[in-house]
Image (cartoon, rainbow, N blue to C red):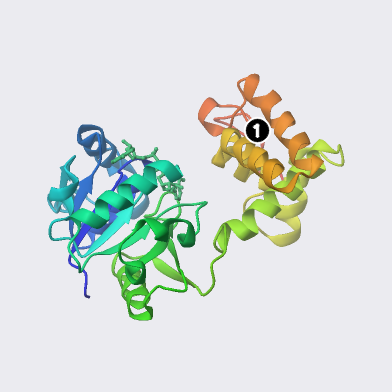
């Protein structure tokens, strides 16, 4: 494995997970964030999930922590870094100034990757001084169990660098998903977003109730989840933001109708699992009833 020292820039929801998963798998990791104290707490908060989902002991969790250092000094964070994964907020402005500063401070050997969900690498590569060493590496939330890494370069990315990142993904127990052509939404969201919108279109047009749509999908395909169960998990605010962005870019009325219906629910305090209400009511949603698919 060519990479040894890894830097994670931005250790919020996703960055903290990437930092910990990487440290747990034997790499020396530096977590860079404007607020390192919060970053530390966020990583510590992963303990219960690793215990519950991966049966990791406290002792082994602590071994992972021992390979992780936290800093708010970018120069320090990248001074001997082989690979920087950027997980800063989804703002082009923030990423632009970060990559400009990073290009000045990182040694020549350092490869850069962005975890951006919505920006393709061509939108970011213009801010770096080493286009052949730049690509996107996109993780899914709860990376320890939803363990894919979508890897997507630009036409300028060196194929040998792409391969190193694929190898690195395997080394931190991700399944690498190699994407050969730039595609907004990578593979997963290219499938998932149209699917969720088709489900919400059926709802806003009054074709069928959310529960009915979920039941049909689950019984017919054998899937353990339906689209409205997924939407509650993603959160209705994110779905609303995406609906607005799609309306802006595509100008199709259906996206605005969906956005307005979602806004009504959000304003009524029904924004998904976190608030206890979404398309279902938690902690005991209707789909947990053993007879849900029989009625
Ligand atoms: P977040 O807001 O939880 O975390 C961002 C972190 O960056 C925060 O800890 C913040 O303190 C820090 N930060 C902000 N500006 C900074 C700066 N200038 N320098 C250093 N640190 C700074 O965001 P997130 O949800 O973890 O998303 C991060 C990236 O990961 C985004 O590009 C997003 O598209 C992508 N992503 C998110 C998810 C998800 O489910 N949340 C999934 C896949 C990819």
Report if residue 189 is visible in the image: yes
The residue drawn where x is 47% and y is 74% is: 155
Q: Dot 1 lies on which element?
A: loop
* Nearest the eye: 103 or 165: 103
Which quadrant of the frame does ligand 1 lie within?
A: top left
Instruction: Estimate the x, y position of residue 7 in percent, counting from the top left.
Output: 23, 55
* Residue at x-position 65% and y-position 33%: 280
Residue lying furthest bottom? 160
Residue 107 falls left or right of residue 228 = left
Asked if residue 284 lies left or right of residue 99, the reply is right
**Residue drawn at 41 percent across, 59 percent down:** 126
Residue 49 in the image, given as x and y percentages of width and height: 34, 45
User: Is residue 55 in sight in this rendering?
Assistant: no
Seen from the viewer's position, the closer of residues 5 and 153 is 153
Quarter of the rendering occupied by the N terminus: bottom left
Q: Vertical placement of 88 versus 81: above or below?
A: above
* Quarter of image, res 224: bottom right
The number of callouts visible is: 1
Q: Quadrant of residue 81?
A: bottom left
List the single residue furthest toward the top: 268
**In the displayed structure, would residue 194 be above or below residue 11?**
below
Q: Is residue 233 above or below residue 190?
A: above
Pick the front one: 178 or 120: 120
User: Badge 1: how crowded within 10 Å, few (<14), some, or many (20+)?
Assistant: some
- State the image quarter where residue 130 is shown: bottom left
**259 relative to 113, above or below:** above
Residue 294: x percent and y percent?
A: 76, 47
Image quadrant where one finds the C terminus = top right
Q: Is mark 1 within 8 Å of ligand 1?
A: no
Residue 116, given in percent of the width and then of the height, sits at: 44, 52
Query: To which residue does mark 1 refer?
Result: 280
């Amino acid at each position: 494995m060519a990479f040894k020292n890894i830097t994670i820039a931005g250790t919020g929801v996703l960055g903290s997970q990437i930092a910990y998963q990487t440290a747990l798998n034997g790499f020396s990791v530096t977590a860079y964030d404007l607020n390192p104290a919060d970053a530390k707490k966020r990583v510590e908060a992963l303990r219960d999930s690793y215990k519950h989902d991966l049966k990791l002991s406290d002792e082994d969790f602590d071994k992972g922590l021992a390979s992780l250092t936290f800093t708010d000094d970018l120069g320090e964070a990248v001074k001997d870094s082989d690979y920087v994964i950027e997980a800063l907020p989804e703002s082009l402005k923030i990423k632009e100034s970060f990559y400009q500063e990073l290009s000045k401070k990182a040694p020549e050997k350092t490869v850069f990757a962005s975890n951006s969900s919505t920006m393709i690498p061509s939108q970011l590569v213009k801010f770096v001084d080493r286009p052949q060493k730049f690509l996107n590496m996109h993780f899914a939330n709860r990376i320890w169990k939803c363990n894919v890494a979508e890897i997507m370069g630009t036409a300028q990315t060196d194929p040998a660098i792409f391969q190193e990142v694929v190898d690195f993904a395997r080394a931190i127990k991700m399944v690498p998903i190699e994407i050969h052509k730039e595609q907004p939404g990578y593979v997963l969201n290219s499938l998932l977003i149209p699917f969720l919108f088709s489900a919400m279109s059926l709802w806003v047009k009054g074709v069928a109730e959310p529960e009915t749509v979920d039941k049909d999908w689950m019984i017919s395909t054998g899937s353990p989840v339906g689209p409205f169960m997924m939407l509650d998990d993603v959160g209705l605010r994110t779905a609303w933001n995406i609906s607005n962005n799609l309306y802006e870019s595509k100008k199709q009325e259906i996206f605005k109708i969906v956005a307005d219906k979602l806004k009504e629910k959000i304003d009524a305090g029904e924004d998904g699992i976190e608030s206890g209400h979404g398309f279902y009511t938690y902690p005991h949603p209707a789909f947990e009833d053993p007879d849900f698919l029989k009625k």
